[in-house]
Amino acid sequence: MIGARSGTGSIMPVTVEDMDSVIRPLGVVGGSLVVTLAVGWAVDHALRRADARHPETPLWNLLRRARLPLQLVICGSLLRGSYEQAHLARGHTRGIGQVLTLVLIGACAWLIVRVAAAVVEASYSRYASAAQDAARVRRVRTQVTLIQRVVTAAVGVVAVAAMLLTFPAMRGFGASMLASAGVIGIVAGIAAQSTLGNLFAGLQIAFGDMVRIGDAVVVEGEWGTVEEITLTYLVVRTWDERRITMPVSYFTSKPFENWSRGNARMTGTVYFHLDHATPVDLMREHLHDVLKGCEQWDGRAWGLVVTDSTPSTIEVRALATAKDADDIWTVRCVVREHMIDWLRREHPYALPRINTATAPGLAEAPDREQATPGAEDIGPGPGAR
């Protein structure tokens, strides 16, 4: 027994039990924190060394993101296993145990998600660095993204269910709900028909190779690039930096243009409406010169032909190729600008014209007598001798 002086000057006895009730909790909590920090530092140091030895794979560096959830799992496990012996907050042992259990379940779910994301991202990075087909890489990227979202959602659902089952009241509730699971499933299926449809459509897009992240698509008359694909919606970034969010079921139920499927190379056309006197041969030669000076032209094909004619104009089509949708747009703009400028400077008569002069009247009309051959021009008639 150890004495302690009270406020009145008297010495109050301090028992070993009182000291033990203070030292033991501090020792348990402090020891758990020290072990957690030590293990976290050791794991992080080992991952750094592994990353230095194997720089060709980003797996070890990505696994370092799981350091915090790992430490939380270790600390939660140590406290959950020793809090009863430490006599933490006597009288609230059950509540503390419940909180530690919930923390441990959440930390385990967080750790699983981080580790799975690191493994998937490392696998994709190695594949993307070795693959030569850009379309194939975009397909794998789309699948990897959706797989990560599915794994995260599944782990989250399991973690929440495990947390609910730790409450005794929820166990009985779960047993009663299990008996009517068929009816509830039917009602939920009807109520969430559109959501489930988008969910299955997202899986179909991921593994059916219909559209991928980075594809150039035309939907509802808008051209853009697929920026994000989730299990329920898809985001298209247009050329003017707008974002169009659409349900993924749209791409499984309606036709759309995918300019990047299979091969991103494209052929572009530019139409000119010109006068009939246009020097088509010279125009064709100048088009070739323009394309030679355009960096976006891939050199595969080009051409210029007259595709149609009207009483007032002719339709001339210029054709060129490029490696993708962005470059073909630039090529078309360059061809249109340079060809019109060349026609305006060198051959202005080739530009379409509209006649605004009035038709000639009777006074300006040609003389009928001059237009009709005379008798002396016709020669003697059949009765002439």
Image (cartoon, grey):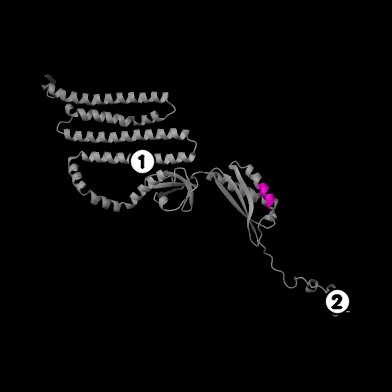
> At x 28% / y 34%, what residue is drawn?
108
Magenta-highlighted residues = 280-286
- Up the image or down, 257 lies above or below 77; here it is below
Quadrant in the picture for the N terminus = top left
Q: Residue at x 45, y 40 (%)?
A: 138
In the depicted view, which residue is nearer to us: 58 or 103? 58
**Mark 1–mark 2 CB contact (< 8 Å):** no
Helix, strand or loop status at disc 2:
loop
Asked whether the viewer can see residue 83, the reply is yes
Q: Does 282 appear in magenta?
A: yes
Residue lying furthest bottom in this view?
Answer: 383
- Nearer the observer: mark 1 or 2; the answer is 2
The C terminus, quarter of image: bottom right
Q: Is residue 111 above or below residue 271?
A: above
Q: Amino acid at mark 2?
A: Pro
Q: Main secondary structure of the magenta part?
A: helix
For mark 2, what is the residue? Answer: 380
Q: Which residue is mark 1?
A: 149
Q: Residues within 10 Å of mark 1 (few under 14, many from 20)?
A: some
The percent position of residue 330, horizontal first and vertical second, equals 57, 45
Where is residue 351, by image quadrant? bottom right
> With 307 as the anchor, is 27 left or right in this view?
left
Q: Residue at the spot x=33%, y=36% of the render? A: 113
Q: CA distance from mark 1 to mark 2?
A: 103 Å
Query: Along the polypeptide, which appears first: circle 1 or circle 2?
Result: 1
**Amino acid at the residue labelled 1:** Arg
* Total residue callouts: 2
